Image (cartoon, rainbow, N blue to C red):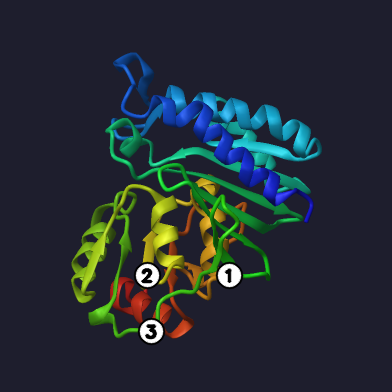
Amino acid sequence: MPVDISALADLLRRAAKAEILPRFRRLGSEDVRSKSEPTDLVTEADEAAERMMKREMAELAPNALFIGEESVAADPALLDKLKDAELAVIVDPVDGTFNFASGIPAFGVMASVVWKGETVAGIIYDPMGDDWVMAEKGAGAFLRRPDGDVVRLHVSETKPIGSMIGMASAGYFYGEQREKVLANLAKVRFFANYRCAAHEYRTFAGGHVQFMIYNKLMPWDHLAGALIATEAGGHVRRLDGSVYEPHQFDGGLLVATDPDSWQVLHDGIFGAEI
């Protein structure tokens, strides 16, 4: 592994304790700003945590391209470098910033490692629960606690579509496609949206839901979780059925417990045409 994953996991935890948790439910109006839309927020916690991670990653993996959500917001051209980088570390300092800024304790800190075009490690740290969900390519997915306790994760058993529960974010589907997706989601038993991919991926990998649907694929939101979901036994594909790769930022994502369930969901919610 080109990056010390244990050290990276510890860095996420230290950044959360130093820069994120002390600001939770203590943000002033001047500490929160909108980016692309009123619900797309950035806070002082996001920026301070990312600065800390970038500074320490320069020592932990000096040859790695560092990509953070807030760094890309400041310099969009940075994202273009991911496709050609031999080694990259991608972080989301506060995933679920809307929740964090609203005082809702459902947010996470995420990091992934991309090496030679593949996601080889993913980490999702929960500051409130003080534990990690982690995966390395080919080695399974695990819940790890600071006391050393480790639990292997596996996705849910297969269920018929009418009994499935899952996570669906329709915010980035538009027009007729949005109407179609929302109408067809009536075929499942229940769906929710935590507004926090970190907790949605953790919920899926822990076997509590059977599917997830997204249409905006920023790497800090999905690379870590997609690897964790795969290593927990899930089937992760873009909406056209292709494998999700780190340099792809569109095309949607459907995550299911197995290939047959993926196809059932795809046909039931999206139909033959995407």
Residue assigned mark 3: 158
Measured as percent of width and height from the top left, residue 240 is found at: 48, 69
Q: Residues within 10 Å of mark 1 (few under 14, many from 20)?
A: many
> Quadrant of residue 188 in the image?
bottom left
Pointer 3 local density, CA inside 10 Å: few below 14, some 14–19, many at least 20: some
* Closest to the observer, 199 or 221: 199
Q: How many marks?
A: 3
Q: Amino acid at mark 3?
A: Thr
Residue at the (51%, 35%) spot, across then down: 16
Identified by mark 1, the residue type is Glu
Q: Who's the residue at 50% across and 26% down the image? A: 19
Q: Nearer the viewer, residue 149 or 186?
A: 149
Q: Nearer the viewer, mark 1 or mark 2?
A: 1
Looking at the image, residue 101 sits to the left or right of residue 20; the answer is: left
Residue for badge 2: 211
> Do residues under tags 1 and 2 come within 8 Å of each other at their CB atoms?
no
Quarter of the image with the C terminus is bottom left
